[in-house]
Image (cartoon, helix red, strand yellow):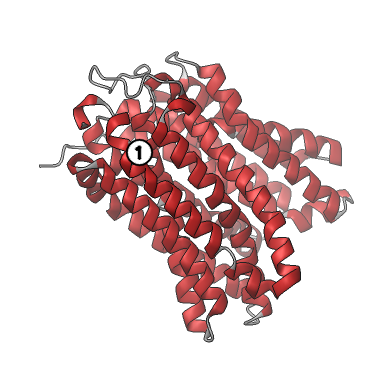
């Protein structure tokens, strides 16, 4: 019989993650309005967003180091939530590029707590029997924000006719409300739910399963981040889909991902409890499905097949966070879980940068469709590398699973 689930902790952290992502999406959607009002070029604004991305990638390592092994993760998560909420509201007051840049940089640094602290905190807040459910529910925050973000901006600007500055005031206020909801969140202490067992006691990069998972996802990052961009380009150039149609498609697969994640958790828990190696196999299958779906969509001779393949690929991608978190945070020692979450984010981003260069070369050689199809290669390699963790995961796990 399934254990009852305490809803407040995962709901509070999910709200923090959703408000963070919605604000970031609003910044991109409202970019033309911001640049026009401030007299900033599109290139300069893109550079500021690049700075935010770099800060968001490096900040998790900083957050993990600040938290260390102390029971302060909830405090940091809530405090940084208030910081980015104030930054979002303050975006409505910017008068020049420098003020905009400072706010974007601070916002990017504050975002680091989401990637470094949320999933390790959930791991200690819930017993291992329900972690699959909890991590799947939390994983639904990303696609939920992908649905709500554009709708919020469209509603505030289109239906209510609000100026972009007022939109940021409203989003900042909503984000502050989410932080208030999370105020009762408490950190139970690092390793509080390890039931006397601590996972591997080796240094993070000496754990074989973690090495294999990170290596696999470094390669997967080469496919994932550039592939999503090239998909949008392919839908426009090959099939003539305009921004509205592409946006509707992106919203549809985000909704599909939410549905899948909300129903995945119990099955994931049962798989992990019966044999954790099966979860590693599922992870490899998800990666292979994502890569194969993108490649098939690029080569599809019919629009319906193209959209179906891309839908499956992106919906599968949304399952990666809960599956990786369940395996990685279980084999990492409690004090190393924050570092694992941070390093995983950096690994994906680093792979994405390499993949962008690779796909640019492939595009020049074979055109956009050939470039997208080429992602099947790093995707297949990533799946094979991740699959090798089947041989190590049981030995690296807590004694209760061995």
Q: Position of residue 174 (x, y in %)?
A: 54, 41
Q: Nearer the viewer, residue 163 or 273?
A: 273
Q: Position of residue 288 (x, y in %)?
A: 43, 60
Q: Examine the rendered structure and indicate whether residue 351 appears above or below residue 9.
A: below
Q: Nearer the viewer, residue 85 or 137?
A: 137
> In the visual, does 80 lie left or right of 325?
right
Q: Name the secondary structure under disc 1.
A: helix
Q: Residue at x 80, y 49 (%)?
A: 45
Quarter of the image for the N terminus: give it. top left
Whether residue 234 is visible here, answered yes or no, is yes
Q: Residue at x 43, y 67 (%)?
A: 312
Q: Which residue does the numbered mark 1 point to in the structure image?
A: 327
Quarter of the image for the C terminus: give it. top left
Q: Position of residue 104 (x, y in %)?
A: 72, 38
The local crowd at label 1, few if under 14, some if 14 to 19, many if 20 or more residues have their Cα within 10 Å, is many
Q: Nearer the viewer, residue 256 or 308?
A: 308
Among the 4 quarters of the image, the one containing residue 70:
top left
Among the 4 quarters of the image, the one containing residue 345:
top right
Q: Examine the rendered structure and indicate whether residue 250 appears above or below residue 297.
A: above
Q: Position of residue 223 (x, y in %)?
A: 57, 57
> In the visual, does 128 lie left or right of 215?
left
Q: Residue furthest bottom?
A: 302
């Amino acid at each position: 019989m399934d254990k009852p689930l305490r809803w407040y902790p995962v709901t509070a952290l999910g709200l923090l993650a959703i408000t963070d992502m919605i604000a970031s999406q609003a910044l991109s959607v409202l970019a033309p309005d911001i640049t026009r009002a401030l007299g900033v070029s599109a290139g300069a604004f893109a550079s500021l967003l690049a700075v935010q991305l770099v800060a968001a990638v490096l900040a998790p390592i900083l957050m993990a180091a600040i938290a260390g092994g102390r029971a302060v993760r909830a405090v940091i998560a809530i405090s940084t939530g208030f910081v980015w909420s104030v930054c979002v509201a303050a975006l409505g007051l910017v008068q020049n590029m420098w003020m905009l840049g400072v706010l974007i940089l601070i916002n990017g640094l504050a975002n680091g707590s989401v990637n470094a602290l949320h999933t390790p905190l959930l791991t200690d807040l819930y017993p291992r029997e329900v972690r699959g459910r909890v991590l799947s529910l939390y994983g639904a925050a990303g696609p939920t924000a992908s649905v709500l973000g554009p709708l919020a901006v469209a509603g505030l600007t289109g239906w209510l006719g609000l100026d972009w500055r007022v939109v940021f005031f409203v989003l900042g206020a909503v984000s502050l409300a989410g932080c208030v909801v999370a105020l009762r969140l408490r950190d139970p202490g690092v390793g509080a739910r390890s039931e006397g067992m601590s996972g591997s006691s080796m240094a993070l990069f000496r754990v074989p399963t973690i090495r294999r998972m990170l290596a696999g996802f470094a390669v997967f990052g080469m496919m994932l981040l550039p592939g999503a961009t090239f998909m949008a380009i392919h839908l426009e150039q090959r099939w003539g889909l305009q921004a509205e149609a592409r946006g509707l498609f992106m919203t549809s697969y985000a909704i599909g991902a939410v549905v899948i994640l909300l129903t995945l958790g119990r099955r994931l828990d049962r798989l992990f409890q019966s044999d954790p190696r099966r979860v590693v196999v599922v992870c490899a299958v998800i990666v292979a499905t994502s890569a194969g779906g993108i490649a098939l969509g690029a080569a599809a001779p019919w629009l319906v097949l193209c959209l179906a393949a891309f839908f499956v690929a992106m919906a599968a991608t949304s399952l990666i966070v809960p599956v990786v978190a369940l395996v990685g945070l279980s084999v990492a020692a409690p004090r190393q879980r924050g570092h694992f979450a941070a390093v995983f984010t950096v690994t994906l981003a680093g792979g994405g940068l390499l993949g962008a260069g690779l796909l640019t070369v492939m595009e020049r050689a074979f055109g956009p469709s050939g470039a997208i199809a080429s992602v099947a290669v790093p995707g297949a390699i990533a799946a094979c590398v991740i699959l090798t963790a089947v041989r190590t995961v049981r030995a690296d796990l807590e004694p209760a699973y061995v």
